[in-house]
Image (tube, helix red, strand yellow):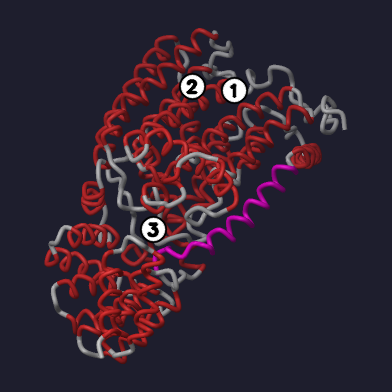
Amino acid sequence: MDDSSSIEPVPEACAPQRGAAKAAMDIPSGLWPVPEVSASRRGASWAACGLAGLVLLVFLQVRTFGFLDYDDGRIVSEHPVVQQGFHLDTVWWAFGHFHFGLYMPLTTLTHLLDVSLFGHWAGGHHLSSVLLHALNSVLLFLALSRLTGAPWPSLAAAALFAVHPLRVESVAWVASRKDLVSGVFFMFALLAYARFAGRPTVRAMLPVIAFYAAALLSKPTVLPLPLVLLLLDWWPLQRMDTSNLRAWRHCIKLLLLEKLPLFLLGLGAALITLMAEHSLETLPDFETFPLAWRLENALLSLVRYLGHFLCPLSLSIHYPQVLEWLGTLAVVGAALLLMFLTLAVLLLRQRRYLAVGWLWFVVLLVPVIGIVQFGSASMADRFMYLPQIGLNVMLVWGSFDLVRTARQRRVLGGVWVSVILVLALLTWWQTGFWRDTRTVFTRALAATQDNDVAYSKLGDLALAAGRAEEALGLFQRAAEIRPENPEAHYNLGCALLDLGRDATAAAAFARAVESRPDNAGYQMNLGVAQLKLGQTDAALARLAEAVRLAPDHVNARINYGVALLRAGRIPESIQHLEEAVRLEPGNATAGANLALALQHQRQP
Protein backbone atom coordinates (compact mmCIF):
# COMPACT_ATOMS: atom_id res chain seq x y z
CA MET A 1 0.00 0.00 0.00
CA ASP A 2 1.31 3.45 -0.91
CA ASP A 3 2.13 5.37 2.26
CA SER A 4 0.59 8.53 0.91
CA SER A 5 -2.77 6.94 0.19
CA SER A 6 -5.70 7.38 2.53
CA ILE A 7 -6.36 4.61 4.98
CA GLU A 8 -9.86 4.45 3.62
CA PRO A 9 -11.98 7.01 1.79
CA VAL A 10 -14.20 8.71 4.34
CA PRO A 11 -17.63 9.95 3.28
CA GLU A 12 -18.06 13.70 3.18
CA ALA A 13 -20.16 13.54 6.36
CA CYS A 14 -17.27 11.97 8.28
CA ALA A 15 -14.32 13.70 6.65
CA PRO A 16 -12.31 16.10 8.81
CA GLN A 17 -12.43 19.51 7.21
CA ARG A 18 -9.35 21.66 6.82
CA GLY A 19 -9.05 23.81 9.90
CA ALA A 20 -11.74 21.81 11.67
CA ALA A 21 -9.73 21.90 14.87
CA LYS A 22 -9.95 25.67 14.93
CA ALA A 23 -13.69 25.68 14.46
CA ALA A 24 -14.36 22.85 16.84
CA MET A 25 -15.11 24.79 20.00
CA ASP A 26 -18.79 24.02 19.49
CA ILE A 27 -19.87 27.15 21.40
CA PRO A 28 -23.62 27.81 21.31
CA SER A 29 -24.77 31.10 19.91
CA GLY A 30 -24.99 33.94 22.41
CA LEU A 31 -21.88 32.84 24.35
CA TRP A 32 -18.46 34.34 23.88
CA PRO A 33 -16.39 32.02 21.66
CA VAL A 34 -12.80 31.23 22.44
CA PRO A 35 -10.55 33.04 19.93
CA GLU A 36 -9.93 30.91 16.90
CA VAL A 37 -6.66 32.53 15.88
CA SER A 38 -3.68 30.39 16.77
CA ALA A 39 -1.01 31.93 18.94
CA SER A 40 2.11 33.06 17.16
CA ARG A 41 5.14 30.82 17.32
CA ARG A 42 6.84 33.35 19.54
CA GLY A 43 3.88 33.45 21.89
CA ALA A 44 3.70 29.65 21.99
CA SER A 45 7.42 29.48 22.72
CA TRP A 46 7.11 31.94 25.59
CA ALA A 47 4.14 30.00 26.97
CA ALA A 48 6.08 26.72 26.74
CA CYS A 49 9.09 28.24 28.51
CA GLY A 50 6.83 29.65 31.19
CA LEU A 51 5.24 26.25 31.80
CA ALA A 52 8.61 24.53 32.02
CA GLY A 53 9.95 27.22 34.34
CA LEU A 54 6.92 26.94 36.61
CA VAL A 55 7.43 23.18 36.92
CA LEU A 56 11.11 23.67 37.78
CA LEU A 57 10.31 26.26 40.44
CA VAL A 58 7.68 24.07 42.10
CA PHE A 59 9.62 20.81 42.06
CA LEU A 60 13.28 21.87 42.19
CA GLN A 61 13.47 21.03 45.92
CA VAL A 62 13.48 17.31 45.05
CA ARG A 63 17.17 17.59 44.14
CA THR A 64 17.91 17.26 47.87
CA PHE A 65 15.62 14.26 48.42
CA GLY A 66 16.75 10.67 48.76
CA PHE A 67 15.38 7.36 47.59
CA LEU A 68 12.36 6.09 49.49
CA ASP A 69 12.46 2.78 51.30
CA TYR A 70 9.27 1.88 49.47
CA ASP A 71 9.72 0.35 45.99
CA ASP A 72 12.60 2.66 45.03
CA GLY A 73 15.07 0.02 46.18
CA ARG A 74 13.45 -2.86 44.33
CA ILE A 75 13.11 -0.82 41.14
CA VAL A 76 16.26 1.31 41.11
CA SER A 77 18.59 1.89 44.05
CA GLU A 78 19.07 -1.76 45.07
CA HIS A 79 18.23 -3.52 41.83
CA PRO A 80 21.30 -5.58 40.81
CA VAL A 81 20.83 -5.04 37.06
CA VAL A 82 19.72 -1.41 37.09
CA GLN A 83 22.68 -0.49 39.30
CA GLN A 84 25.01 -1.62 36.50
CA GLY A 85 23.97 1.39 34.45
CA PHE A 86 23.33 1.85 30.76
CA HIS A 87 25.18 -0.55 28.47
CA LEU A 88 24.37 -3.21 25.91
CA ASP A 89 23.77 -6.07 28.35
CA THR A 90 21.43 -4.09 30.61
CA VAL A 91 19.51 -2.70 27.62
CA TRP A 92 19.05 -6.25 26.41
CA TRP A 93 17.88 -7.24 29.90
CA ALA A 94 15.35 -4.38 29.97
CA PHE A 95 13.66 -5.64 26.81
CA GLY A 96 13.86 -9.30 27.79
CA HIS A 97 12.57 -9.26 31.37
CA PHE A 98 9.71 -8.01 33.51
CA HIS A 99 10.65 -5.24 35.92
CA PHE A 100 8.77 -5.20 39.23
CA GLY A 101 5.74 -6.94 37.78
CA LEU A 102 5.52 -4.80 34.64
CA TYR A 103 6.90 -4.92 31.13
CA MET A 104 8.24 -1.36 30.87
CA PRO A 105 11.60 -1.52 29.05
CA LEU A 106 11.61 2.15 27.98
CA THR A 107 11.06 3.29 31.57
CA THR A 108 13.82 0.94 32.70
CA LEU A 109 16.15 2.50 30.12
CA THR A 110 15.67 5.90 31.77
CA HIS A 111 16.62 4.39 35.14
CA LEU A 112 19.70 2.79 33.60
CA LEU A 113 20.70 6.09 32.03
CA ASP A 114 20.24 7.90 35.35
CA VAL A 115 22.51 5.39 37.10
CA SER A 116 25.18 5.96 34.46
CA LEU A 117 24.87 9.75 34.79
CA PHE A 118 24.27 10.20 38.52
CA GLY A 119 25.24 6.93 40.20
CA HIS A 120 23.77 6.74 43.71
CA TRP A 121 22.93 10.45 43.89
CA ALA A 122 19.16 10.32 44.28
CA GLY A 123 18.86 14.04 43.46
CA GLY A 124 19.91 13.39 39.89
CA HIS A 125 17.22 10.75 39.47
CA HIS A 126 14.65 13.19 40.87
CA LEU A 127 15.77 15.98 38.53
CA SER A 128 15.29 13.66 35.56
CA SER A 129 11.71 13.14 36.68
CA VAL A 130 11.16 16.90 36.98
CA LEU A 131 12.45 17.47 33.44
CA LEU A 132 10.22 14.72 32.08
CA HIS A 133 7.17 16.29 33.76
CA ALA A 134 8.11 19.72 32.41
CA LEU A 135 8.32 18.19 28.93
CA ASN A 136 4.91 16.58 29.36
CA SER A 137 3.36 19.88 30.42
CA VAL A 138 4.73 21.65 27.34
CA LEU A 139 3.66 18.83 25.02
CA LEU A 140 0.15 18.87 26.47
CA PHE A 141 -0.11 22.60 25.78
CA LEU A 142 1.04 22.11 22.20
CA ALA A 143 -1.25 19.12 21.64
CA LEU A 144 -4.36 20.84 22.99
CA SER A 145 -3.57 23.96 20.99
CA ARG A 146 -3.14 21.92 17.83
CA LEU A 147 -6.30 19.90 18.42
CA THR A 148 -8.60 22.76 19.42
CA GLY A 149 -7.07 25.84 17.88
CA ALA A 150 -7.64 27.56 21.24
CA PRO A 151 -4.26 28.53 22.75
CA TRP A 152 -5.39 30.27 25.94
CA PRO A 153 -7.66 27.49 27.26
CA SER A 154 -4.94 25.02 26.23
CA LEU A 155 -2.38 26.95 28.26
CA ALA A 156 -4.66 27.06 31.30
CA ALA A 157 -5.40 23.33 31.07
CA ALA A 158 -1.70 22.49 30.68
CA ALA A 159 -0.75 24.71 33.63
CA LEU A 160 -3.43 23.07 35.76
CA PHE A 161 -1.91 19.71 34.79
CA ALA A 162 1.63 20.94 35.48
CA VAL A 163 1.26 22.17 39.07
CA HIS A 164 -1.72 20.36 40.54
CA PRO A 165 -0.76 18.65 43.85
CA LEU A 166 -1.84 15.30 42.41
CA ARG A 167 1.35 15.47 40.30
CA VAL A 168 3.62 15.21 43.35
CA GLU A 169 3.57 11.43 43.64
CA SER A 170 4.52 10.90 40.00
CA VAL A 171 7.30 13.50 40.08
CA ALA A 172 8.79 13.15 43.59
CA TRP A 173 8.76 9.35 43.76
CA VAL A 174 11.43 7.71 41.60
CA ALA A 175 9.41 4.47 41.49
CA SER A 176 6.65 6.37 39.63
CA ARG A 177 8.92 7.29 36.72
CA LYS A 178 6.76 5.12 34.45
CA ASP A 179 3.94 7.69 34.64
CA LEU A 180 6.22 10.37 33.24
CA VAL A 181 7.84 8.31 30.49
CA SER A 182 4.54 6.91 29.24
CA GLY A 183 3.14 10.44 29.45
CA VAL A 184 5.78 11.74 27.04
CA PHE A 185 4.79 9.24 24.36
CA PHE A 186 1.09 9.74 25.12
CA MET A 187 1.46 13.48 24.42
CA PHE A 188 3.45 12.86 21.25
CA ALA A 189 0.70 10.47 20.11
CA LEU A 190 -1.86 13.26 20.60
CA LEU A 191 0.26 15.63 18.51
CA ALA A 192 0.71 13.02 15.79
CA TYR A 193 -3.03 12.31 15.76
CA ALA A 194 -3.83 16.00 15.37
CA ARG A 195 -1.70 15.95 12.22
CA PHE A 196 -3.28 12.70 11.04
CA ALA A 197 -6.79 14.10 11.46
CA GLY A 198 -5.98 16.88 9.01
CA ARG A 199 -5.00 14.36 6.33
CA PRO A 200 -5.76 10.75 7.30
CA THR A 201 -3.17 8.69 5.41
CA VAL A 202 -1.23 5.57 6.22
CA ARG A 203 1.98 7.60 6.48
CA ALA A 204 0.35 10.00 8.95
CA MET A 205 -0.97 7.11 11.08
CA LEU A 206 2.45 5.45 11.45
CA PRO A 207 3.77 7.97 14.03
CA VAL A 208 0.58 7.56 16.06
CA ILE A 209 1.11 3.79 16.11
CA ALA A 210 4.79 4.18 16.98
CA PHE A 211 4.16 6.59 19.87
CA TYR A 212 1.35 4.40 21.21
CA ALA A 213 3.64 1.37 21.15
CA ALA A 214 6.34 3.35 22.95
CA ALA A 215 3.82 4.47 25.58
CA LEU A 216 2.77 0.86 26.15
CA LEU A 217 6.44 -0.10 26.53
CA SER A 218 6.72 2.53 29.25
CA LYS A 219 3.58 1.74 31.24
CA PRO A 220 0.72 -0.45 30.03
CA THR A 221 -2.01 1.60 31.72
CA VAL A 222 -2.11 3.86 28.63
CA LEU A 223 -4.09 1.07 26.95
CA PRO A 224 -7.25 3.22 26.48
CA LEU A 225 -5.48 5.76 24.23
CA PRO A 226 -7.37 4.58 21.07
CA LEU A 227 -10.65 5.30 22.87
CA VAL A 228 -9.36 8.77 23.80
CA LEU A 229 -8.58 9.39 20.14
CA LEU A 230 -12.12 8.32 19.28
CA LEU A 231 -13.41 10.91 21.76
CA LEU A 232 -11.26 13.55 20.10
CA ASP A 233 -12.84 12.63 16.78
CA TRP A 234 -16.14 13.85 18.25
CA TRP A 235 -14.67 16.95 19.87
CA PRO A 236 -12.75 18.97 18.94
CA LEU A 237 -11.88 17.38 15.58
CA GLN A 238 -15.53 16.98 14.46
CA ARG A 239 -14.85 13.86 12.41
CA MET A 240 -18.26 12.37 13.21
CA ASP A 241 -21.54 13.12 11.50
CA THR A 242 -24.22 12.94 14.19
CA SER A 243 -27.04 14.34 12.06
CA ASN A 244 -28.71 10.93 11.89
CA LEU A 245 -28.17 7.46 13.32
CA ARG A 246 -27.17 5.86 10.02
CA ALA A 247 -24.47 8.40 9.26
CA TRP A 248 -23.19 8.22 12.83
CA ARG A 249 -22.87 4.43 12.69
CA HIS A 250 -21.04 4.59 9.39
CA CYS A 251 -18.58 7.14 10.74
CA ILE A 252 -17.94 5.08 13.85
CA LYS A 253 -17.16 1.99 11.77
CA LEU A 254 -14.64 3.86 9.65
CA LEU A 255 -13.04 5.59 12.63
CA LEU A 256 -12.70 2.28 14.45
CA LEU A 257 -11.25 0.64 11.34
CA GLU A 258 -8.47 3.20 11.00
CA LYS A 259 -7.56 2.57 14.65
CA LEU A 260 -7.50 -1.22 14.31
CA PRO A 261 -3.66 -1.42 14.57
CA LEU A 262 -3.87 0.51 17.84
CA PHE A 263 -6.48 -1.84 19.29
CA LEU A 264 -4.38 -4.86 18.30
CA LEU A 265 -1.33 -3.33 20.00
CA GLY A 266 -3.40 -2.71 23.11
CA LEU A 267 -4.63 -6.31 23.17
CA GLY A 268 -1.08 -7.62 22.98
CA ALA A 269 0.03 -5.27 25.75
CA ALA A 270 -2.86 -6.39 27.96
CA LEU A 271 -1.84 -10.04 27.61
CA ILE A 272 1.79 -9.24 28.41
CA THR A 273 0.71 -7.20 31.43
CA LEU A 274 -1.25 -10.13 32.86
CA MET A 275 1.82 -12.35 32.45
CA ALA A 276 4.04 -9.75 34.08
CA GLU A 277 1.77 -9.28 37.08
CA HIS A 278 1.84 -13.01 37.81
CA SER A 279 5.66 -12.88 37.75
CA LEU A 280 5.76 -10.49 40.71
CA GLU A 281 6.24 -12.40 43.95
CA THR A 282 6.55 -9.39 46.24
CA LEU A 283 3.00 -8.07 46.16
CA PRO A 284 1.35 -7.58 49.57
CA ASP A 285 0.03 -10.87 50.91
CA PHE A 286 -3.70 -10.21 50.78
CA GLU A 287 -6.46 -12.51 49.73
CA THR A 288 -7.93 -11.59 46.38
CA PHE A 289 -10.86 -9.28 46.87
CA PRO A 290 -14.19 -10.50 45.40
CA LEU A 291 -15.29 -8.91 42.13
CA ALA A 292 -18.35 -7.26 43.71
CA TRP A 293 -16.11 -5.69 46.35
CA ARG A 294 -13.72 -4.39 43.69
CA LEU A 295 -16.56 -2.87 41.69
CA GLU A 296 -17.87 -1.09 44.77
CA ASN A 297 -14.39 0.20 45.56
CA ALA A 298 -14.05 1.42 41.96
CA LEU A 299 -17.23 3.51 42.29
CA LEU A 300 -16.05 5.04 45.56
CA SER A 301 -12.58 5.68 44.15
CA LEU A 302 -13.96 7.64 41.18
CA VAL A 303 -15.75 9.99 43.56
CA ARG A 304 -12.69 10.24 45.82
CA TYR A 305 -10.50 11.11 42.83
CA LEU A 306 -12.92 13.93 41.99
CA GLY A 307 -12.67 15.11 45.59
CA HIS A 308 -8.86 15.10 45.51
CA PHE A 309 -8.93 17.01 42.23
CA LEU A 310 -11.15 19.73 43.68
CA CYS A 311 -9.61 19.79 47.17
CA PRO A 312 -6.05 18.35 47.14
CA LEU A 313 -5.22 18.87 50.81
CA SER A 314 -5.08 15.36 52.31
CA LEU A 315 -2.89 13.46 49.87
CA SER A 316 -1.02 10.32 50.87
CA ILE A 317 1.50 7.87 49.43
CA HIS A 318 -0.92 5.06 50.36
CA TYR A 319 -4.71 5.06 50.70
CA PRO A 320 -6.10 2.12 52.70
CA GLN A 321 -9.39 0.47 51.85
CA VAL A 322 -12.39 2.41 53.14
CA LEU A 323 -15.33 0.15 52.28
CA GLU A 324 -15.26 -1.40 55.75
CA TRP A 325 -16.26 1.84 57.46
CA LEU A 326 -18.07 3.72 54.67
CA GLY A 327 -20.56 0.93 53.96
CA THR A 328 -23.21 0.26 51.35
CA LEU A 329 -24.89 3.67 51.60
CA ALA A 330 -21.72 5.40 50.44
CA VAL A 331 -21.44 3.05 47.45
CA VAL A 332 -25.04 3.74 46.43
CA GLY A 333 -24.49 7.47 46.80
CA ALA A 334 -21.33 7.31 44.69
CA ALA A 335 -23.12 5.33 41.96
CA LEU A 336 -26.00 7.84 41.85
CA LEU A 337 -23.62 10.81 41.71
CA LEU A 338 -21.61 9.28 38.87
CA MET A 339 -24.78 8.42 36.93
CA PHE A 340 -26.05 11.99 37.35
CA LEU A 341 -22.77 13.51 36.16
CA THR A 342 -22.58 11.18 33.16
CA LEU A 343 -26.15 11.89 32.08
CA ALA A 344 -25.67 15.63 32.57
CA VAL A 345 -22.59 15.89 30.36
CA LEU A 346 -24.10 13.66 27.67
CA LEU A 347 -27.32 15.67 27.53
CA LEU A 348 -25.45 18.97 27.08
CA ARG A 349 -24.84 18.20 23.41
CA GLN A 350 -23.86 21.74 22.47
CA ARG A 351 -20.96 21.58 24.91
CA ARG A 352 -19.23 18.45 23.72
CA TYR A 353 -16.07 19.23 25.65
CA LEU A 354 -17.94 18.29 28.85
CA ALA A 355 -18.73 14.77 27.63
CA VAL A 356 -15.28 14.31 26.09
CA GLY A 357 -13.51 15.50 29.24
CA TRP A 358 -15.63 13.34 31.53
CA LEU A 359 -15.26 10.21 29.41
CA TRP A 360 -11.51 10.89 29.06
CA PHE A 361 -11.28 10.90 32.86
CA VAL A 362 -13.30 7.69 33.31
CA VAL A 363 -11.80 5.73 30.41
CA LEU A 364 -8.17 6.36 31.38
CA LEU A 365 -8.89 5.41 35.01
CA VAL A 366 -10.44 2.04 34.15
CA PRO A 367 -7.13 0.09 33.97
CA VAL A 368 -6.06 1.33 37.43
CA ILE A 369 -9.37 1.70 39.26
CA GLY A 370 -8.98 -1.67 41.01
CA ILE A 371 -11.29 -3.91 38.98
CA VAL A 372 -8.14 -5.84 38.12
CA GLN A 373 -6.44 -6.01 41.51
CA PHE A 374 -2.80 -4.98 41.88
CA GLY A 375 -1.74 -4.45 45.47
CA SER A 376 -3.73 -3.44 48.53
CA ALA A 377 -4.25 0.31 48.00
CA SER A 378 -7.76 1.54 47.24
CA MET A 379 -6.44 4.32 44.98
CA ALA A 380 -3.25 6.26 44.21
CA ASP A 381 -2.53 9.85 43.23
CA ARG A 382 -0.18 8.74 40.45
CA PHE A 383 -3.11 7.08 38.67
CA MET A 384 -4.52 10.56 37.98
CA TYR A 385 -1.53 11.65 35.90
CA LEU A 386 -3.26 11.34 32.52
CA PRO A 387 -6.95 10.97 33.51
CA GLN A 388 -6.98 14.41 35.15
CA ILE A 389 -6.47 16.06 31.76
CA GLY A 390 -10.12 15.30 31.00
CA LEU A 391 -11.27 17.14 34.12
CA ASN A 392 -8.99 20.04 33.21
CA VAL A 393 -10.68 20.29 29.81
CA MET A 394 -14.13 20.31 31.39
CA LEU A 395 -13.24 23.01 33.90
CA VAL A 396 -11.18 25.27 31.66
CA TRP A 397 -13.34 25.17 28.55
CA GLY A 398 -16.43 25.47 30.71
CA SER A 399 -15.10 28.66 32.29
CA PHE A 400 -14.16 30.18 28.91
CA ASP A 401 -17.59 29.21 27.64
CA LEU A 402 -19.27 31.49 30.19
CA VAL A 403 -17.54 34.80 29.44
CA ARG A 404 -18.87 37.23 26.83
CA THR A 405 -17.09 40.57 27.07
CA ALA A 406 -13.49 41.70 26.96
CA ARG A 407 -13.67 42.69 30.63
CA GLN A 408 -14.96 39.27 31.60
CA ARG A 409 -12.10 37.72 29.65
CA ARG A 410 -9.56 39.77 31.60
CA VAL A 411 -11.21 38.82 34.89
CA LEU A 412 -11.23 35.16 33.89
CA GLY A 413 -7.54 35.37 33.01
CA GLY A 414 -6.80 36.82 36.43
CA VAL A 415 -8.83 34.09 38.11
CA TRP A 416 -6.92 31.35 36.30
CA VAL A 417 -3.55 32.93 37.11
CA SER A 418 -4.57 33.06 40.77
CA VAL A 419 -5.76 29.45 40.77
CA ILE A 420 -2.53 28.24 39.18
CA LEU A 421 -0.40 30.17 41.68
CA VAL A 422 -2.35 28.79 44.66
CA LEU A 423 -2.04 25.25 43.31
CA ALA A 424 1.68 25.79 42.70
CA LEU A 425 2.15 26.78 46.36
CA LEU A 426 0.12 23.76 47.53
CA THR A 427 2.19 21.48 45.31
CA TRP A 428 5.44 22.93 46.63
CA TRP A 429 4.18 22.32 50.18
CA GLN A 430 3.02 18.79 49.39
CA THR A 431 6.32 17.96 47.69
CA GLY A 432 8.17 18.69 50.93
CA PHE A 433 6.58 15.65 52.56
CA TRP A 434 8.45 13.37 50.13
CA ARG A 435 11.97 14.22 51.32
CA ASP A 436 12.45 10.84 53.05
CA THR A 437 10.61 7.68 54.01
CA ARG A 438 9.78 8.69 57.58
CA THR A 439 8.33 12.06 56.54
CA VAL A 440 6.15 10.71 53.76
CA PHE A 441 4.63 7.97 55.91
CA THR A 442 4.17 10.24 58.91
CA ARG A 443 2.22 12.49 56.56
CA ALA A 444 0.23 9.45 55.40
CA LEU A 445 -0.90 8.82 58.99
CA ALA A 446 -2.02 12.43 59.30
CA ALA A 447 -3.86 12.46 55.96
CA THR A 448 -5.69 9.11 56.20
CA GLN A 449 -7.46 6.87 58.72
CA ASP A 450 -6.32 3.41 59.82
CA ASN A 451 -3.38 3.32 57.44
CA ASP A 452 -1.85 -0.05 58.24
CA VAL A 453 0.83 0.27 55.56
CA ALA A 454 2.06 3.55 57.07
CA TYR A 455 2.18 2.01 60.56
CA SER A 456 4.10 -0.99 59.20
CA LYS A 457 6.63 1.11 57.30
CA LEU A 458 7.27 3.39 60.28
CA GLY A 459 7.67 0.25 62.36
CA ASP A 460 10.27 -1.05 59.90
CA LEU A 461 12.22 2.20 60.26
CA ALA A 462 12.05 2.08 64.06
CA LEU A 463 13.18 -1.56 64.15
CA ALA A 464 16.09 -0.83 61.80
CA ALA A 465 17.12 2.04 64.11
CA GLY A 466 17.14 -0.28 67.15
CA ARG A 467 13.93 1.05 68.68
CA ALA A 468 12.22 -2.32 69.04
CA GLU A 469 9.63 -1.21 71.62
CA GLU A 470 8.47 1.64 69.37
CA ALA A 471 8.38 -0.72 66.40
CA LEU A 472 6.32 -3.23 68.40
CA GLY A 473 3.63 -0.65 69.10
CA LEU A 474 3.46 0.39 65.44
CA PHE A 475 3.29 -3.22 64.22
CA GLN A 476 0.59 -4.05 66.75
CA ARG A 477 -1.52 -1.16 65.46
CA ALA A 478 -1.06 -2.37 61.86
CA ALA A 479 -2.13 -5.90 62.85
CA GLU A 480 -5.20 -4.54 64.65
CA ILE A 481 -6.29 -2.59 61.57
CA ARG A 482 -5.88 -5.47 59.13
CA PRO A 483 -5.60 -8.77 61.00
CA GLU A 484 -6.01 -10.78 57.77
CA ASN A 485 -2.71 -9.40 56.47
CA PRO A 486 0.03 -11.99 57.14
CA GLU A 487 2.77 -9.40 56.66
CA ALA A 488 1.49 -7.50 59.70
CA HIS A 489 1.91 -10.59 61.88
CA TYR A 490 5.32 -11.28 60.35
CA ASN A 491 6.48 -7.75 61.21
CA LEU A 492 5.07 -8.15 64.71
CA GLY A 493 7.04 -11.38 65.11
CA CYS A 494 10.25 -9.63 64.02
CA ALA A 495 9.87 -6.98 66.72
CA LEU A 496 9.05 -9.60 69.37
CA LEU A 497 12.05 -11.69 68.34
CA ASP A 498 14.30 -8.66 68.63
CA LEU A 499 12.96 -8.05 72.15
CA GLY A 500 13.66 -11.65 73.14
CA ARG A 501 10.00 -12.65 73.40
CA ASP A 502 10.56 -15.83 71.45
CA ALA A 503 7.34 -17.67 72.28
CA THR A 504 5.01 -14.82 71.25
CA ALA A 505 7.21 -14.20 68.20
CA ALA A 506 6.81 -17.83 67.15
CA ALA A 507 3.03 -17.50 67.51
CA ALA A 508 3.01 -14.40 65.30
CA PHE A 509 5.18 -16.09 62.67
CA ALA A 510 2.95 -19.17 62.78
CA ARG A 511 -0.09 -17.01 62.00
CA ALA A 512 1.71 -15.50 59.02
CA VAL A 513 2.76 -18.95 57.77
CA GLU A 514 -0.81 -20.21 58.15
CA SER A 515 -1.97 -17.58 55.66
CA ARG A 516 1.02 -17.81 53.30
CA PRO A 517 2.81 -21.16 53.61
CA ASP A 518 4.58 -20.47 50.30
CA ASN A 519 6.51 -17.50 51.70
CA ALA A 520 10.12 -18.47 52.41
CA GLY A 521 10.73 -15.52 54.74
CA TYR A 522 7.79 -16.41 56.95
CA GLN A 523 8.89 -20.05 57.14
CA MET A 524 12.47 -19.08 57.91
CA ASN A 525 11.69 -16.73 60.79
CA LEU A 526 9.27 -19.21 62.32
CA GLY A 527 12.10 -21.73 62.21
CA VAL A 528 14.49 -19.26 63.84
CA ALA A 529 12.03 -18.58 66.68
CA GLN A 530 11.49 -22.30 67.21
CA LEU A 531 15.25 -22.86 67.23
CA LYS A 532 15.67 -20.22 69.94
CA LEU A 533 12.94 -21.98 71.95
CA GLY A 534 14.88 -25.25 71.70
CA GLN A 535 12.36 -26.85 69.32
CA THR A 536 15.07 -28.13 66.99
CA ASP A 537 13.06 -30.72 65.06
CA ALA A 538 10.24 -28.27 64.34
CA ALA A 539 12.80 -25.61 63.37
CA LEU A 540 14.55 -27.99 60.97
CA ALA A 541 11.28 -28.70 59.19
CA ARG A 542 10.49 -24.99 58.76
CA LEU A 543 14.00 -24.06 57.64
CA ALA A 544 14.14 -26.94 55.18
CA GLU A 545 10.87 -25.69 53.68
CA ALA A 546 12.28 -22.17 53.44
CA VAL A 547 15.30 -23.47 51.52
CA ARG A 548 13.04 -25.50 49.24
CA LEU A 549 10.88 -22.46 48.50
CA ALA A 550 13.85 -20.15 47.93
CA PRO A 551 17.08 -22.06 47.16
CA ASP A 552 19.00 -18.80 46.60
CA HIS A 553 17.89 -17.21 49.89
CA VAL A 554 21.22 -16.75 51.70
CA ASN A 555 19.81 -16.25 55.20
CA ALA A 556 17.61 -19.33 54.84
CA ARG A 557 20.71 -21.39 53.97
CA ILE A 558 22.67 -19.96 56.90
CA ASN A 559 19.90 -20.58 59.43
CA TYR A 560 19.29 -24.08 58.12
CA GLY A 561 23.02 -24.79 58.34
CA VAL A 562 23.11 -23.57 61.96
CA ALA A 563 20.08 -25.70 62.87
CA LEU A 564 21.68 -28.76 61.27
CA LEU A 565 24.89 -28.07 63.18
CA ARG A 566 22.97 -27.94 66.47
CA ALA A 567 21.28 -31.20 65.56
CA GLY A 568 24.69 -32.81 65.03
CA ARG A 569 24.19 -33.25 61.28
CA ILE A 570 27.54 -31.69 60.48
CA PRO A 571 28.10 -32.80 56.82
CA GLU A 572 24.66 -31.43 55.84
CA SER A 573 25.37 -28.25 57.76
CA ILE A 574 28.63 -27.73 55.89
CA GLN A 575 26.88 -28.35 52.57
CA HIS A 576 24.31 -25.59 53.13
CA LEU A 577 26.78 -23.13 54.65
CA GLU A 578 29.14 -23.62 51.70
CA GLU A 579 26.22 -22.92 49.39
CA ALA A 580 25.48 -19.73 51.34
CA VAL A 581 29.11 -18.62 50.90
CA ARG A 582 28.92 -19.41 47.18
CA LEU A 583 25.74 -17.36 46.81
CA GLU A 584 27.21 -14.39 48.72
CA PRO A 585 30.99 -14.67 49.06
CA GLY A 586 31.29 -11.56 51.23
CA ASN A 587 28.73 -12.66 53.84
CA ALA A 588 30.63 -12.66 57.14
CA THR A 589 27.93 -14.60 59.02
CA ALA A 590 27.98 -17.41 56.47
CA GLY A 591 31.79 -17.57 56.58
CA ALA A 592 31.96 -17.62 60.38
CA ASN A 593 29.37 -20.37 60.70
CA LEU A 594 31.05 -22.42 57.98
CA ALA A 595 34.37 -22.16 59.86
CA LEU A 596 32.61 -23.29 63.04
CA ALA A 597 31.02 -26.28 61.26
CA LEU A 598 34.38 -27.29 59.77
CA GLN A 599 35.97 -27.04 63.21
CA HIS A 600 33.30 -29.38 64.61
CA GLN A 601 33.97 -31.79 61.76
CA ARG A 602 37.70 -31.95 62.60
CA GLN A 603 37.05 -32.70 66.25
CA PRO A 604 37.29 -36.42 67.19
Residue 73 falls left or right of residue 356: left
Q: Earlier in the sequence, mark 1 or mark 2?
A: 1
At 53% across and 19% down in the image, what residue appears?
31
Q: Which residue is mark 1?
A: 148
Q: Magenta residues?
A: 260-285
Where residue 138 sits: x, y (%)? Answer: 48, 23
| Secondary structure of residue under mark 3 | loop
Q: Earlier in the sequence, mark 3 or mark 2?
A: 2
Q: For the stretch drawn in magenta, what is the main secondary structure?
A: helix
Q: Which quarter of the figure is the C terminus placed in?
A: bottom left
Mark 3–mark 2 Cα distance, whole angstroms, equals 34 Å
Mark 1–mark 2 Cα distance, whole angstroms, equals 9 Å
Residue 293 falls left or right of residue 253: left
Q: Identify the image quadrant of residue 216.
A: top right
User: How would you rate the neighbour count of disc 3 (Cα within 10 Å): few for under 14, some for 14-19, many for 20 or more?
Assistant: some
User: How would you rate the neighbour count of disc 2 (Cα within 10 Å): few for under 14, some for 14-19, many for 20 or more?
Assistant: many
* Magenta residue check for 111: no
Q: Which residue is mark 3?
A: 377
What's the residue type where badge 1 is placed?
A: Thr
Q: Which residue is mark 2?
A: 153
What's the residue type where badge 2 is placed?
A: Pro
